Image: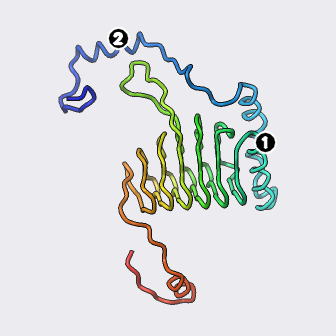
Amino acid sequence: MSDTEDTGKGLSPGLIAEQKRRMDEGVYDNSWWSPGRGWWWQALWKVIGMPIFRCSTDELFSFYWSSRFRGWLLRLFGARTGKNVYIRPTVRITYPWNLEIGDNSSIGDCTWIYNLVPVRIGSRVCVSQNTFLCTGGHDPYDMTMELIAGTIVISDYAWVCADCYINHGVTIGEGTVVGARSVVMKDMPPWKICVGNPCKPVKDRVLRSEEEVFFDNNGGDFRRER
Protein backbone atom coordinates (compact mmCIF):
# COMPACT_ATOMS: atom_id res chain seq x y z
CA MET A 1 0.00 0.00 0.00
CA SER A 2 1.26 3.48 -0.88
CA ASP A 3 2.21 5.86 1.94
CA THR A 4 -0.13 8.41 0.39
CA GLU A 5 -3.12 6.09 -0.14
CA ASP A 6 -6.27 7.06 1.74
CA THR A 7 -7.34 4.19 3.99
CA GLY A 8 -10.45 6.02 5.19
CA LYS A 9 -9.46 5.51 8.83
CA GLY A 10 -7.69 8.83 9.41
CA LEU A 11 -4.32 9.33 11.09
CA SER A 12 -3.47 8.13 14.57
CA PRO A 13 -2.67 10.78 17.23
CA GLY A 14 0.91 9.52 17.37
CA LEU A 15 1.42 9.90 13.61
CA ILE A 16 -0.15 13.37 13.67
CA ALA A 17 2.22 14.46 16.43
CA GLU A 18 5.21 13.07 14.51
CA GLN A 19 4.21 14.87 11.32
CA LYS A 20 3.76 18.16 13.17
CA ARG A 21 7.21 17.75 14.71
CA ARG A 22 8.81 17.11 11.32
CA MET A 23 7.06 20.11 9.78
CA ASP A 24 8.18 22.35 12.66
CA GLU A 25 11.78 21.23 12.14
CA GLY A 26 11.72 21.50 8.35
CA VAL A 27 13.39 24.41 6.52
CA TYR A 28 11.74 25.65 3.32
CA ASP A 29 14.27 25.95 0.50
CA ASN A 30 13.42 26.97 -3.08
CA SER A 31 16.97 28.05 -3.94
CA TRP A 32 16.88 25.78 -7.01
CA TRP A 33 14.25 28.04 -8.64
CA SER A 34 14.94 31.28 -10.49
CA PRO A 35 12.34 33.66 -12.00
CA GLY A 36 14.57 34.08 -15.05
CA ARG A 37 15.75 37.65 -14.47
CA GLY A 38 17.34 39.64 -11.66
CA TRP A 39 15.63 41.63 -8.95
CA TRP A 40 15.98 44.92 -10.86
CA TRP A 41 13.90 43.58 -13.76
CA GLN A 42 11.29 42.31 -11.31
CA ALA A 43 11.20 45.71 -9.59
CA LEU A 44 10.91 47.59 -12.91
CA TRP A 45 7.99 45.45 -13.98
CA LYS A 46 6.11 45.72 -10.69
CA VAL A 47 6.76 49.43 -10.08
CA ILE A 48 6.67 50.82 -13.64
CA GLY A 49 5.63 48.24 -16.23
CA MET A 50 2.60 46.74 -14.51
CA PRO A 51 0.95 50.09 -13.56
CA ILE A 52 1.40 51.40 -17.12
CA PHE A 53 -0.02 48.16 -18.50
CA ARG A 54 -3.12 48.49 -16.31
CA CYS A 55 -3.65 52.14 -17.22
CA SER A 56 -3.66 51.51 -20.97
CA THR A 57 -7.43 50.99 -21.08
CA ASP A 58 -9.56 50.92 -24.21
CA GLU A 59 -11.55 53.85 -22.82
CA LEU A 60 -8.48 56.12 -22.96
CA PHE A 61 -7.16 54.78 -26.26
CA SER A 62 -8.74 52.99 -29.18
CA PHE A 63 -9.04 49.21 -29.06
CA TYR A 64 -6.41 48.88 -31.78
CA TRP A 65 -3.78 51.17 -30.30
CA SER A 66 -4.20 50.13 -26.66
CA SER A 67 -3.82 46.48 -27.63
CA ARG A 68 -0.72 47.17 -29.70
CA PHE A 69 0.76 49.23 -26.87
CA ARG A 70 0.28 46.46 -24.30
CA GLY A 71 1.91 43.97 -26.66
CA TRP A 72 4.87 46.30 -27.16
CA LEU A 73 5.20 46.82 -23.40
CA LEU A 74 5.22 43.09 -22.73
CA ARG A 75 7.86 42.55 -25.41
CA LEU A 76 9.92 45.32 -23.84
CA PHE A 77 9.97 43.21 -20.67
CA GLY A 78 10.90 40.04 -22.51
CA ALA A 79 7.60 38.46 -23.56
CA ARG A 80 7.30 36.84 -26.98
CA THR A 81 4.01 37.78 -28.61
CA GLY A 82 2.78 37.28 -32.15
CA LYS A 83 0.59 39.36 -34.44
CA ASN A 84 -2.90 40.57 -33.51
CA VAL A 85 -2.63 39.55 -29.87
CA TYR A 86 -5.22 41.12 -27.57
CA ILE A 87 -4.65 41.15 -23.81
CA ARG A 88 -7.05 43.02 -21.54
CA PRO A 89 -5.43 45.62 -19.24
CA THR A 90 -6.77 43.83 -16.13
CA VAL A 91 -4.73 40.69 -16.90
CA ARG A 92 -2.17 39.95 -14.19
CA ILE A 93 1.20 38.67 -15.44
CA THR A 94 3.78 37.75 -12.82
CA TYR A 95 6.87 37.62 -15.05
CA PRO A 96 6.37 38.78 -18.67
CA TRP A 97 9.71 37.30 -19.77
CA ASN A 98 8.23 33.85 -19.04
CA LEU A 99 5.29 34.40 -21.40
CA GLU A 100 4.89 33.34 -25.03
CA ILE A 101 1.72 34.00 -27.07
CA GLY A 102 1.13 33.12 -30.72
CA ASP A 103 -0.73 35.02 -33.44
CA ASN A 104 -4.41 36.06 -33.18
CA SER A 105 -4.85 35.04 -29.54
CA SER A 106 -6.68 36.84 -26.74
CA ILE A 107 -6.51 36.88 -22.94
CA GLY A 108 -9.68 37.96 -21.09
CA ASP A 109 -10.26 40.27 -18.14
CA CYS A 110 -8.79 39.43 -14.72
CA THR A 111 -6.91 36.37 -15.94
CA TRP A 112 -3.89 35.64 -13.73
CA ILE A 113 -0.83 34.22 -15.48
CA TYR A 114 1.27 33.05 -12.53
CA ASN A 115 4.32 32.12 -14.59
CA LEU A 116 7.16 31.19 -12.25
CA VAL A 117 8.29 29.14 -15.26
CA PRO A 118 7.20 29.56 -18.90
CA VAL A 119 3.58 29.73 -20.03
CA ARG A 120 3.23 29.03 -23.75
CA ILE A 121 -0.04 30.03 -25.43
CA GLY A 122 -0.41 29.10 -29.09
CA SER A 123 -2.04 30.80 -32.07
CA ARG A 124 -5.80 31.46 -32.31
CA VAL A 125 -6.23 30.69 -28.62
CA CYS A 126 -8.86 32.29 -26.39
CA VAL A 127 -8.32 32.38 -22.64
CA SER A 128 -11.50 33.79 -21.12
CA GLN A 129 -11.89 36.04 -18.09
CA ASN A 130 -10.92 35.11 -14.52
CA THR A 131 -8.85 32.10 -15.56
CA PHE A 132 -5.89 31.17 -13.34
CA LEU A 133 -2.82 29.70 -15.07
CA CYS A 134 -0.77 28.46 -12.11
CA THR A 135 2.73 27.16 -12.89
CA GLY A 136 3.69 26.82 -9.21
CA GLY A 137 2.51 24.67 -6.34
CA HIS A 138 3.78 22.74 -3.33
CA ASP A 139 4.34 19.09 -2.49
CA PRO A 140 1.75 18.30 0.23
CA TYR A 141 3.66 15.17 1.27
CA ASP A 142 6.95 16.99 1.88
CA MET A 143 7.58 18.28 5.42
CA THR A 144 8.73 21.67 4.04
CA MET A 145 6.04 21.82 1.30
CA GLU A 146 8.73 22.00 -1.38
CA LEU A 147 8.02 24.23 -4.38
CA ILE A 148 6.85 22.44 -7.53
CA ALA A 149 6.87 24.28 -10.87
CA GLY A 150 5.89 23.15 -14.35
CA THR A 151 5.38 24.80 -17.73
CA ILE A 152 1.80 25.30 -18.92
CA VAL A 153 1.10 24.89 -22.65
CA ILE A 154 -2.18 25.91 -24.30
CA SER A 155 -2.00 24.64 -27.86
CA ASP A 156 -3.22 26.29 -31.07
CA TYR A 157 -7.00 26.75 -31.58
CA ALA A 158 -7.84 25.96 -27.94
CA TRP A 159 -10.39 27.83 -25.85
CA VAL A 160 -10.15 27.99 -22.07
CA CYS A 161 -13.53 29.27 -20.87
CA ALA A 162 -14.19 31.60 -17.93
CA ASP A 163 -13.10 30.91 -14.34
CA CYS A 164 -10.91 27.89 -15.11
CA TYR A 165 -7.93 26.71 -13.08
CA ILE A 166 -5.00 25.25 -15.04
CA ASN A 167 -2.49 23.38 -12.89
CA HIS A 168 1.29 23.46 -13.25
CA GLY A 169 2.76 21.17 -15.90
CA VAL A 170 -0.52 20.85 -17.84
CA THR A 171 -0.81 20.85 -21.64
CA ILE A 172 -4.16 21.70 -23.26
CA GLY A 173 -4.31 19.90 -26.59
CA GLU A 174 -4.76 21.53 -29.97
CA GLY A 175 -8.33 22.66 -30.64
CA THR A 176 -9.61 21.64 -27.22
CA VAL A 177 -12.31 23.56 -25.33
CA VAL A 178 -12.14 23.61 -21.53
CA GLY A 179 -15.60 24.37 -20.12
CA ALA A 180 -16.27 27.21 -17.69
CA ARG A 181 -15.05 26.79 -14.10
CA SER A 182 -13.22 23.56 -14.85
CA VAL A 183 -10.24 22.48 -12.75
CA VAL A 184 -7.58 21.02 -15.04
CA MET A 185 -5.08 18.87 -13.13
CA LYS A 186 -3.67 16.83 -16.02
CA ASP A 187 -3.12 17.06 -19.79
CA MET A 188 -6.19 17.30 -22.02
CA PRO A 189 -6.19 15.57 -25.44
CA PRO A 190 -6.60 17.50 -28.72
CA TRP A 191 -9.94 18.44 -30.27
CA LYS A 192 -12.10 17.56 -27.29
CA ILE A 193 -14.75 19.29 -25.18
CA CYS A 194 -13.53 18.95 -21.59
CA VAL A 195 -15.39 19.94 -18.42
CA GLY A 196 -15.56 19.39 -14.70
CA ASN A 197 -13.65 19.22 -11.44
CA PRO A 198 -11.45 17.40 -12.09
CA CYS A 199 -11.67 18.23 -15.80
CA LYS A 200 -12.29 15.30 -18.17
CA PRO A 201 -12.92 14.95 -21.92
CA VAL A 202 -16.64 14.38 -22.61
CA LYS A 203 -16.97 14.55 -26.41
CA ASP A 204 -15.16 15.39 -29.64
CA ARG A 205 -15.08 18.97 -30.85
CA VAL A 206 -16.44 18.86 -34.41
CA LEU A 207 -16.87 22.26 -36.06
CA ARG A 208 -20.01 23.02 -38.01
CA SER A 209 -19.75 22.83 -41.77
CA GLU A 210 -19.76 26.00 -43.88
CA GLU A 211 -23.26 25.10 -45.09
CA GLU A 212 -24.60 24.91 -41.52
CA VAL A 213 -23.01 28.24 -40.62
CA PHE A 214 -24.50 29.91 -43.73
CA PHE A 215 -27.95 28.45 -43.02
CA ASP A 216 -27.93 29.62 -39.39
CA ASN A 217 -26.68 33.10 -40.23
CA ASN A 218 -29.45 33.58 -42.76
CA GLY A 219 -32.37 32.85 -40.46
CA GLY A 220 -32.52 29.09 -40.96
CA ASP A 221 -33.75 26.62 -38.39
CA PHE A 222 -31.20 23.90 -38.92
CA ARG A 223 -31.62 21.28 -36.16
CA ARG A 224 -28.33 19.71 -35.18
CA GLU A 225 -27.42 17.35 -32.43
CA ARG A 226 -25.36 18.91 -29.62
Q: Quadrant of residue 191?
A: bottom left
Between residue 193 and residue 110, name the one nearer to us.
Answer: 193
Q: Residue 189 location in percent, x, y?
A: 42, 56
Do the CB atoms of the residues marked 2 and 1 lie less than 8 Å apart?
no
Question: Type of residue at label 1?
Answer: Leu
> As displayed, is residue 131 above or below residue 142?
below
* Sequence-wise first label, 2 or 1: 2
> As displayed, is residue 45 above or below residue 193?
above
Q: Closer to the observer: label 2 or label 1?
A: 1
Q: Dot 1, how many residues are within 10 Å of its Cα: few (below 14), some (14-19), or many (20+)?
A: few
Q: Is residue 103 left or right of residue 146?
A: right
How is the model colour-coded?
Answer: rainbow
Q: Is residue 207 left or right of residue 120?
A: left
Q: Circle 2 sits on which residue?
A: 21
Between residue 67 and residue 38, name the one nearer to us.
Answer: 38
In which quadrant is the C terminus drawn? bottom left
Q: Residue 16 location in percent, x, y?
A: 28, 17
Q: Residue 30 location in percent, x, y?
A: 53, 21
> As displayed, is residue 214 above or below residue 105?
below
- Mark 2 residue element: helix
Question: Type of residue at label 2?
Answer: Arg
Q: Circle 1 sits on which residue?
A: 76
Question: What's the residue at 36%, 25% (across, down)?
Answer: 141
In which quadrant is the N terminus drawn? top left
